[in-house]
Image (tube, rainbow, N blue to C red):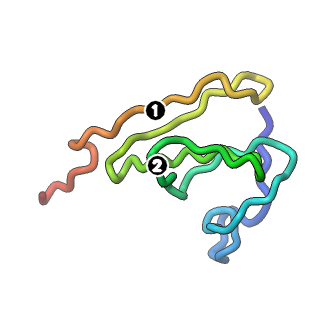
Amino acid sequence: MELLVVGDVHGSHPDSVLWNRGKLKNIGKLQIIGHTPCKLGKAEFDRISSTLIIDTGAYRPVGLTAVKEDQDGEIEEIIFEPTLLIDVMSEKG
């Protein structure tokens, strides 16, 4: 599996990899991202940018999504676990 990062990972610029909320570019490879919650609470695929968005809102609480890949980087499985309320409840309330 090859990890490819394009852009500034640690920066505070709004267009850095961490903070960018704009349209993603197609880089010729599948991109798997989180940090921007999916609207429907399940993983979404954007064909234009070849991006699988897996932030399914564990904090909301909806669930947590993970992707299992084989050695060639092909997706073997998309795993979803519903959030347990006890995991997101504050200690105060």
Q: Amino acid at mark 2?
A: Leu
Where, by quadrant of the figure, is residue 20 drawn? Answer: bottom right
Q: Residue 6 placed where, x, y %?
A: 79, 58
Where, by quadrant of the figure, is residue 35 drawn? Answer: bottom right
N-terminal of the two: label 2 or label 1? Answer: 2
Q: Which mark is residue 7?
A: none
Question: What's the residue at 62%, 75% (across, down)?
Answer: 12
Q: Secondary structure at mark 2?
A: loop
Q: Residue 79 placed where, x, y %?
A: 51, 29
Q: Residue 74 placed where, x, y %?
A: 74, 27
Drawn side of residue 37 relative to residue 4, left or right? left
Q: Secondary structure at mark 1?
A: strand
Question: What's the residue at 68%, 28% (across, down)?
Answer: 75
Question: What's the residue at 53%, 35% (across, down)?
Answer: 66
Q: Nearer the viewer, residue 18 or 60?
A: 60
Q: Nearer the viewer, residue 17 or 36?
A: 36
Mark 2 neighbour density, 10 Å: few (under 14) some (14–19) many (20 or more): few
Quarter of the image for the C terminus: give it: bottom left
Mark 1 neighbour density, 10 Å: few (under 14) some (14–19) many (20 or more): some
Tell me the CA gap for discs 2 and 1.
13 Å
Quarter of the image for the N terminus: give it: top right
Q: Which residue is mark 1?
A: 80
Q: Amino acid at mark 1?
A: Phe
Query: Mark 2–mark 1 contact, CB under 8 Å?
Result: no
Q: Residue 70 placed where, x, y %?
A: 71, 22
Question: What's the residue at 51%, 52% (across, down)?
Answer: 38
* Residue at the extreme bottom of the image, as rendered: 13
Q: Which mark is residue 40?
A: 2
